Amino acid sequence: MQFGLGLTDLVKRPTDSAADVRGDEFAAGRQLLADKITRVQPLIVCFNGLTGYQQFFQEYTQPGRQARRLHGAKVFVLPSTSARNAAYSRDVVLGYFRDLCALRDTLRHNGRRQEG
């Protein structure tokens, strides 16, 4: 993998908005995603948008690197890249992507599971 990235979804069906996803779908997705993370053991789990993080962990947060870990992986939250998300400017979103890239590069350089 050239970029060292993998993508998945918390809920595997297309919707116009996260508001269209039912609670039981999020609950089922939480378990499937946790199982996948345990199996794959990524360096970082990145949520594209606050809703995915909030539905997975059942708590609110702000974008950026999170204090928690998920099955050993560091957790990062990007502002949603959806065109409907007007809460963050393009430059702010790009800044979060740069922060994520820097975290990935640091982890690759320092070793897979090193704290920090």
Image (cartoon, helix red, strand yellow):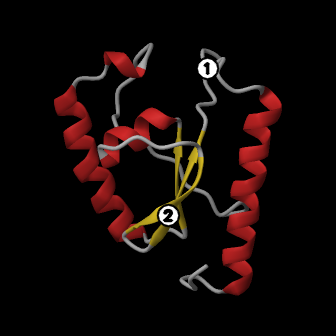
| 24 and 3: which is toward the camera | 24
- Label 2, on which residue? 67
Quarter of the image containing the N terminus?
Answer: bottom right
Q: Is residue 70 above or below residue 63?
A: below
Quick one: label 1, few (<14), some, or many (20+) residues within 10 Å? few
Q: Is residue 10 visible?
A: no
The quarter holding residue 110 reads bottom right
Task: From the viewer's perspective, tell me whether residue 113 is left or right of residue 103.
Answer: left
The quarter holding residue 54 reads top left
Q: Is residue 112 above or below residue 90?
A: below
Q: Earlier in the sequence, mark 2 or mark 1?
A: 2
**In the rendered structure, which amino acid carries the disc numbered 2?**
Ala
| 56 and 9: which is toward the camera | 56
Q: Is residue 76 above or below residue 86?
A: below
Q: Residue at coordinates 40% horizontally, 22% vertically from top-left?
A: 18
**In the rendered structure, which amino acid carries the disc numbered 1?**
Asn
Task: From the viewer's perspective, tell me whether residue 116 is left or right of residue 96.
Answer: left
Quarter of the image containing the C terminus?
Answer: bottom right
Could you say whether the residue bearing mark 2 is in a helix, strand or loop? strand
Mark toward the viewer: 2 or 1: 2
Task: From the viewer's perspective, tell me whether residue 17 is left or right of residue 92.
Answer: left
- Label 1, on which residue? 85
Q: Position of residue 98 (x, y in %)?
A: 78, 52
Q: Residue at coordinates 61% horizontally, 20% vertically from top-left?
A: 85
Q: Position of residue 3 (x, y in %)?
A: 71, 60
Q: Is residue 60 visible?
A: yes
| Residue sticking out furthest to the left | 24
Quick one: label 2, few (<14), some, or many (20+) residues within 10 Å? few
